[in-house]
Image (cartoon, rainbow, N blue to C red):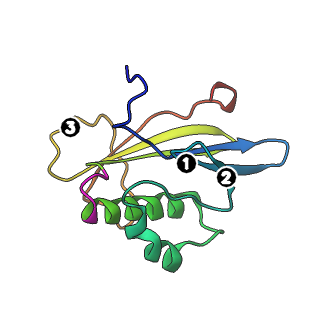
């Protein structure tokens, strides 16, 4: 448990699906607590500055789910290549009208046991684990 520590901070991204408006919503929550509704995407964290050029060059609002997942994988991997604090694997939560699912992508040299492998285009050499879709009411 972390109790009011000055040593830790986090900037968060919160997303969900609005059934009434039939659209996704993305919010950035800064380390100071500011809540900002984002349009299309949000970036945050120490590695985010390393991927802004990738986002400017590659982001399209009309991406399919698989294209969006690949875009995020590439962005996080670019951040990890330049920023030692960006982690060692990629975890993505896909949220849509059907519910939520989680993708976890481990590096090639990982000894992690992966029960299910899903190959994404252009990313065949990575191990991937995906949980089952959870109904939207259980988010």
Closer to the camera, 59 or 12?
Answer: 12
Q: Residues within 10 Å of mark 1 (few under 14, many from 20)?
A: some
Quarter of the image where one finds residue 95: top right
Is 114 part of what is drawn in magenta?
no
Q: Residue at x 45, y 59 (%)?
A: 72
Identify the magenta region.
Answer: 82-86
Eye-nearest disc, 2 or 3? 2
Q: Is residue 73 above or below residue 4?
A: below
Eye-nearest disc, 3 or 1? 1
User: Which quadrant does the C terminus fall into?
Assistant: top right
| Disc 3 element | loop
Q: Residue 25 at x, y = what percent?
A: 70, 49
Main SS, magenta region, reads loop
Q: Is residue 102 above or below residue 48?
A: above
| Disc 1 element | loop
For residue 123, say whether it is visible.
Answer: no
User: Which disc is residue 112 wearing?
Assistant: 3
Marks 1,2: beta carbons within 8 A? yes
Q: Residue 102 at x, y = what percent?
A: 47, 40
| Disc 2 element | strand
Mark pair 1, 2: CA separation: 8 Å
Closer to the camera, 58 or 117?
Answer: 58
Q: Residue 86 at x, y = what percent?
A: 32, 53
Farthest residue to the top: give it. 1
User: Which disc is residue 30 wearing?
Assistant: 1
Q: Residues within 10 Å of mark 2 (few under 14, many from 20)?
A: few
Q: Residue at x 60, y 67 (%)?
A: 63
Quarter of the image where one finds residue 8: top left
Mark closest to the chain's N terminus, 2 or 3:
2
Mark pair 3, 1: CA separation: 32 Å
Q: In this view, does 36 lie to the left or right of 108?
A: right
Which residue position holds label 2?
Answer: 36
């Amino acid at each position: 448990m972390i109790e009011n520590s000055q040593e830790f901070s986090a900037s968060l991204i919160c997303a969900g699906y609005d059934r009434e408006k039939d659209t996704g919503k993305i919010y950035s929550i800064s380390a100071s607590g500011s809540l900002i509704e984002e349009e299309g995407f949000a970036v945050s964290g120490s590695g985010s500055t390393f991927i802004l050029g990738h986002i400017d060059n590659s982001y399209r609002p009309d991406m399919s789910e698989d294209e969006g997942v690949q875009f995020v994988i590439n962005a996080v991997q670019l951040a990890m290549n330049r920023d030692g604090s960006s982690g060692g694997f990629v975890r993505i939560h896909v949220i849509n009208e059907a519910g939520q699912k989680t993708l976890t992508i481990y590096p090639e040299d990982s000894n992690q046991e992966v029960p299910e492998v899903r190959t994404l285009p252009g990313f065949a050499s990575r191990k991937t684990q995906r949980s089952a879709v959870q109904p939207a009411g259980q988010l």
